[in-house]
Image (cartoon, rainbow, N blue to C red):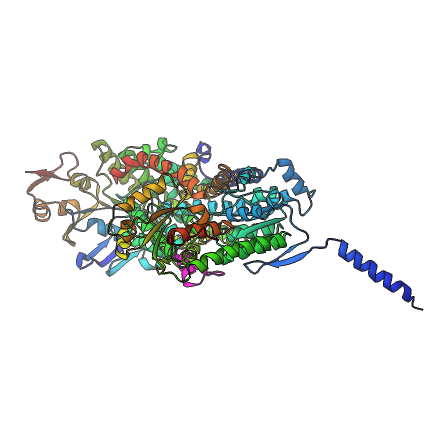
Amino acid sequence: MKDYRLIIPNIILAALLLWSVPSWSMTFKDALGREVTLSDAPERIIPLAPSLTEILYYLGLGDNVAGVTEYSYYPPEAKEKPSVGSYIDPNIEEIITLSPDLVIGTKDGNLPNSVYLLEQAHIPVYVINPRNVRDSLSTIDEIGELCGVPEKAHQLVENLNKRLEAVQNAVASRERPLVFLQINKAPVMTVNKNTFLNDLIILAGGTNMTADEPITYPRISIEEVIRKKPDIIIISTMDMEELGEKARDEWMKWKSIPAVKNNRVYLIDSDIINRPSQRIIDGLEAMARLIHPEINWDKK
Amino acid sequence: MRLKNIGYRYEKRWVLKGIDLDLRAGEILGILGPNGSGKSTLLKIMDGVLKPQEGEVTVRNKPFHGYKRSAFAREVAMVSQENTFRFSFTSLEVVLMGRFPHLKRMQFEGSGDIDIAVNSLRATEALEFAGRSIHDLSEGEKQRVFIARALAQEPKVILLDEPTSFLDLKFKRDIFMLISSLCCEKGLSVALVSHDIDLVAQYCHRLIMLKHGNIYASGDPYKVITSTNIEDVYGCPVLVDSHPLSGRPRVNLV
Amino acid sequence: MIERYRAKIITPSKVITLSITMLAMLVLVIVTSLVLGTADVSFKDILDIILGNTPQDDPIRLIIFRIRLPRILLAGLVGFALSLGGVVFQAILRNPLADPFVLGVSSGSAFGAVLAMILGFGFGLGIPLMSFAGALFTIYLVMMIGARNIGVESSTILLTGVIINAFFTAIIMFFISVSADDRLHTMLFWLYGDLSQSRYTQLFIIAPIVLIASIVLYGFSKDLNIITTGEENAAQLGVEVEMIKKASLIIVSLIMGLVVAFSGLIGFVGLIVPHLARMAFHSDHRLLIPVASIGGAIFLIAADTLARTIVSPSELPVGVITAFLGAPFFIILLKKRGSQWTRS
């Protein structure tokens, strides 16, 4: 004898239960194709790169950051967090001691050995691999989903995308000046087309002078720069006051270079162009202003 | 030991040619000759270190190549000029190295071996150095230890390459006397190369004189050491007379 | 009276006693190293783990078994092999300053390994095999160029080694800098060694090979003793000089190749430890081989532990520590032996 009167309440009860319990368990696939399963939104997260630290704070998850790598000093509060060693070879023991429920790493920076050891210690590791500016933005989305704040991430990323598109539209019809980007003072080093920074130059409306070099971060001679006659020289530096100025002074001697002749040797803060985080858009805007000063950027 | 028609060539040059010699038990054979005449080479061939391109070496009627290295080392021992000790060993340990051909691969030296080593050191009057590092000894003392090592091999034949070249007069005599007594007592065959013609004349039973890799003269000292021979081979005029006490030939430079 | 002399020589019981003592020291060093590190681990924790009182997922247990222990074991094996290689090289080349690193054999190995990676054999046994080939090739070069007419004892062979070292290191740096994979840490691995990538599977391969190699080489002890006094000397005492030389050099290449493939270039171990062992104990290889080998294990474990604790939470590459300790040592040795060089 079936009691139909009980079925409906049971179904409603079941639905209520399912809906109220925050069953959140999800499986994600990271940049290495690894499956990472989290049974709950992570509360203790360790980012293994300064850019990741920035993103977490940006998403409002600063309190969930359990430890950081060296050079994670943006935002300034991050300096107070416990250190887990260098970004390339983080100290696994320290990480284990901090009992994280999620570690986020990068394919390009961290050693594969670190991922292996963390797996051995049963700590979930999620690896990202942003290869260009757009990837950086989608990383913010990914991390937002991973850490249980997808809507906030989505909104922030939308705004960043708007800024990105604004720059693109502004430089779309313009000529592209030849840009030489210097990332190291001595020896003089630059970047080829297989880099993030190359992408940035292109998005900012320029052409990378050394795009076709065979080595990714090649050393380049001053003669080569003189020969190629870049319209703009941008020096990426962590120390704008001293080292950056010294580097600029070095170039000012060579008047035959168009960039020098037209006084277009600029300094830019490495931090905003090297980190695949939200600040990359700041970097993009800064670079675009240097490359295309003729545009009225402030009109909105 | 017998050498038949030995020829040895280094690159294109024949260092030794047509060497025939016999070494009998209980006799001391002296090998003379100026530098470059092939003396050391001859000794090395007798020791099995160098292989002659022509001719045959036999020990106790068995050809040399029929012997395994260690078996040969039980028959023939050599005291050579080359003795570089980069690392420190005591004299006793050096002499015990002479027991190597008698030991199996993983075998450690036993009390029998120690007895033999000690007796060898005693025979060469070097027992007092047993515990001292070989580096701490003088040339003469070292020489005695090396001879003891050769003795420890319990060989039938001992070869000596310039055993007295760095020694004081007293030691020169001592070594020759030692060799002589060992030879007689134990019935060893000894072949030695030396520049000390007088001592060689005194103590050797037979001599051979080499010139340009050939045997120029051989026989007893009286026959071989003559002023003509010496002048011819060494290119140096000498006067050969008789040692007042022993009657053996004595060489005087003019 | 003979008893007096019997006491002075090497006997099996002396060898065994000394070996056991060294092994005891090794265990002590291993346990101490397990306790040291960034995370706080005490002896009591280790005791609990051994007694099985700790749950499987306990973080301390994970740290010990997954991170520290494999690393310590690799350090021990590598140190053992490097020291053993040093002992054998010094014997055959009759040169107290010879060691596979100084003579460029390690860099030749590394070159083989890097070549394997570039040509695409970077999987399975490809790297260790090419590493072994690299070591063999380098030994051949060193013997050919350095030992030709001058004799292996002279300083020429050291010079040859220095040059070969420089040559291969330059090639390795070249490959790394032009390769698409611009990871700085790869360079550090090859040039200064890195024991943190230890895996138990690797250990299961390396350990038996190294142990068997050491047993075979131990069997050559008496021969090696005599070879140190001169090759002609040795030949006339009945030592099969050529056979022993070839076999020893091949075996050393094998273990060097293996060790470099899994841990990068770590230098000076084969120089310092055999020397200390000789000075403290004896030049007789029947004693020297076990003492120096186990001593090498102890030394490298200690050096690696230092490397991972001294600037915690960062780490220094272990080769930096050994170079720091080894270079001054080498210079002191050179000065001490200075007078002896003029004699040769």
Residue C136 % position (x, y):
38, 56
Residue B105 % position (x, y):
45, 50
Relative side of A267 to C204, left or right: left
Pick the quarter of the image with the N terminus of chain C: top left
Residue drawn at point x = 91 percent, y = 64 percent: A5
Q: Is residue C20 above or below residue A173?
A: above
Relative side of A126 to A206, left or right: right
Give the magenta part as a residue range.
C111-134
Pick the quarter of the image with the C terminus of chain C: top left
Residue A271 % position (x, y):
45, 46
Q: Nearer the viewer, residue C60 or B224?
A: C60
* Mark count: 0
Q: Nearer the viewer, residue B148 or C93?
A: C93
Q: Nearer the viewer, residue A267 or B5?
A: A267
Please identify the residue farthest to the front as the structure is shown: A299
Residue C39 % position (x, y):
58, 39
Decide whether residue C44 is among the magenta residues. no
Please identify the residue farthest to the bottom as the structure is shown: A1
Decide whether residue C131 is among the magenta residues. yes
| Any part of residue C288 in sight | yes
> Quadrant of the rendered structure where residue B112 is?
top left
| Any part of residue B189 in sight | no
Relative side of C200 to A258, left or right: right
Q: Which SS type dominates the magenta stretch?
A: helix
Q: Nearer the viewer, residue A298 or A277?
A: A298
